[in-house]
Amino acid sequence: MAESGPLILVVEDELPIRRFLRTSLAGEGYRLAEAETGQKAVRMATQLPPDLVILDLGLPDIDGQEVLKQLREWLAAPIIIVSARDQEKQKVAALDSGADDYLTKPFSTAELLARIRVALRHSAGAHTDAGPMFVSGDLRIDWAGRHVYMKDTEVHLTPLEYKLLAVLAKHAGKVLTHRYLLNEVWGPLHAGETHYLRVFMAGLRRKIEIEPSHPRILITEQGVGYRLISSEDT
């Protein structure tokens, strides 16, 4: 295990999963701290602030949502939620409460490591709008000129389509909930109008996806929201 790698706090009550995470993350040079309860997690994070938190929602003492809220009162580090498949509403609530990403159990090592890389990259301040151009695969966005290109061919977007794409790109690799996107693009009065989002996302996909019915850039996170694939996802 690296002595100077990023410190990851794993908050998980299931010992087999902690062992799996310990092996997977230590092998990639990350330092680990482990907590099997919410109270212990908050105490450990206070004593030695981690660079990233992996947080299970189903904890034996405190609900994971409460742990998230307590950590978010002062901790700026990325928090990745891990959740069971039938906890869709909890995942949405967690993302709206400040979680950076979520993974549904069971998840693969490759996907976990990719999500961690993305979260740490954002945390380090390498934001997508820091430079004049956003690039992810064949997609390029010229922030200054407000131009969008796919494979060097300019794509003409409506103002709302561009605004939606820009919000997703500025948070590339991160799951954005329906409510967050509607609030950012259309404003708080339209936070419940999910049909707006479906219509404009379909329009965006027709313009930038090779196969709009099988998107590889604008990914649907079922029941939760959308995620624009980051170069760090690969």
Image (cartoon, helix red, strand yellow):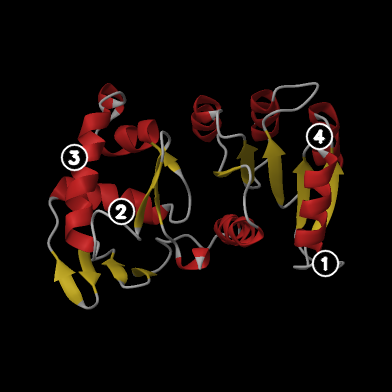
Vertical position of residue 108 compared to residue 65: above or below:
below
Element carrying mark 2: helix
Quick one: label 4 or label 3, which is nearer the N terminus? Answer: 4
Q: Amino acid at mark 3?
A: Val
Furthest toward the bottom, the residue is: 152
Tell me whether circle 2 and circle 1 mark residues in contact (CB < 8 Å): no
Tell me whether circle 2 and circle 4 mark residues in contact (CB < 8 Å): no
Quick one: label 3 or label 2, which is nearer the N terminus? Answer: 2
Q: How many marks?
A: 4
Element carrying mark 4: loop
| Residue ID at (25%, 37%) | 197
Q: Position of residue 44 (x, y in %)?
A: 85, 39
| Residue ID at (70%, 22%) | 63
Quick one: label 3 or label 1, which is nearer the N terminus? Answer: 1
Q: Which residue is mark 3?
A: 199
Element carrying mark 3: helix
Image quadrant holding the N terminus, namely bottom right
| Residue ID at (30%, 69%) | 140
What separation in Å lies between label 3 and label 2 (alpha carbons)? 17 Å
- Dot 4, how many residues are within 10 Å of its Cα: few (below 14), some (14-19), or many (20+)? many
Q: Which residue is mark 4?
A: 13
Q: Amino acid at mark 4?
A: Asp
Q: Which residue is mark 2?
A: 166
Instruction: Say which of 196 and 133 sits in front.
Output: 196
Q: Which residue is mark 1?
A: 4
Q: Amino acid at mark 1?
A: Ser
What separation in Å lies between label 3 and label 1 (alpha carbons)? 47 Å
